[in-house]
Amino acid sequence: MLTAEISPAEAVDASITWSSSNPETASVDGDGLVTAVALGETVITATAGDKSATCTVNVVEDIYGINMEDMTADEVRAAIQDAIADGIVNIKLIGEFEKIGIPTDASVYNPNYDQNPFYNTAIELIDMTEVTGWPEVDVDGQLSRSERGETPRRSKSHRCAGILAVLCP
């Protein structure tokens, strides 16, 4: 619900008219309640007399959240697979990296890569901005030398392959 305030309070005409530049994306009623209709962008305008104010509204796809804090890696994997089976293409993960169940030595160069629960799926977006405890991995996605107790040689990288977009911290 958007709100508009008329100033001064004793204005002769205190009525507000709401409109949407793209009602096929989002509509707005006489009280400022915005309703999403389709993906896209619209500008909502509040007009009072000869004055107006605008607000840009972006309608985006829902993102399916998985809070991994009280889950095992197997439960997280099952939740991801259930979401995929339900046609979910955008997932947000919250919690420790190890709960995702991706082995730190998993990469496209070894047979463990298929343990990545997102490998070879139709997932379009993975939001990992609230995933903590990331292991340090090298540029090939392998457990870094420092994590193996060796002298570090390569820069830190989080390899996420086969996905259209990944939001990482």
Image (cartoon, rainbow, N blue to C red):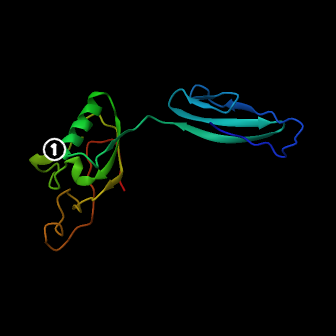
Q: Amino acid at mark 1?
A: Gln
Task: Please tell me how many numbered marks the rendered image carries.
Answer: 1
* 29 left or right of 124 in image: right
Query: Toward which corner of the image does residue 134 lie, by quadrant?
Result: bottom left
Query: Toward which corner of the image does residue 57 lie, by quadrant?
Result: top right
Q: Residue furthest front?
A: 70
Judging from the image, what secondary structure is the residue with disc 1 in? helix
**Residue 119 visible at all:** no
**Residue 121 visible at all:** yes
Q: Position of residue 131 (x, y in %)?
A: 32, 53
Q: Which residue is mark 1?
A: 115
Q: Residue furthest right?
A: 12
The residue positioned 61% from the left and 40% from the top of the image is 56
Q: Residue furthest left?
A: 111
> Is 14 or 112 nearer to us in this picture?
14
Q: Position of residue 31 (x, y in %)?
A: 69, 31
Q: Position of residue 159 (x, y in %)?
A: 26, 53
Query: Toward which corner of the image does residue 25 lie, by quadrant?
Result: top right
Quarter of the figure with the N terminus: top right
> Is 63 or 95 nearer to us in this picture?
95
Quarter of the figure with the C terminus: bottom left
The residue positioned 65% from the left and 41% from the top of the image is 55
The residue positioned 53% from the left and 33% from the top of the image is 40
Q: Residues within 10 Å of mark 1 (few under 14, many from 20)?
A: some
Q: Position of residue 96 (x, y in %)?
A: 27, 54
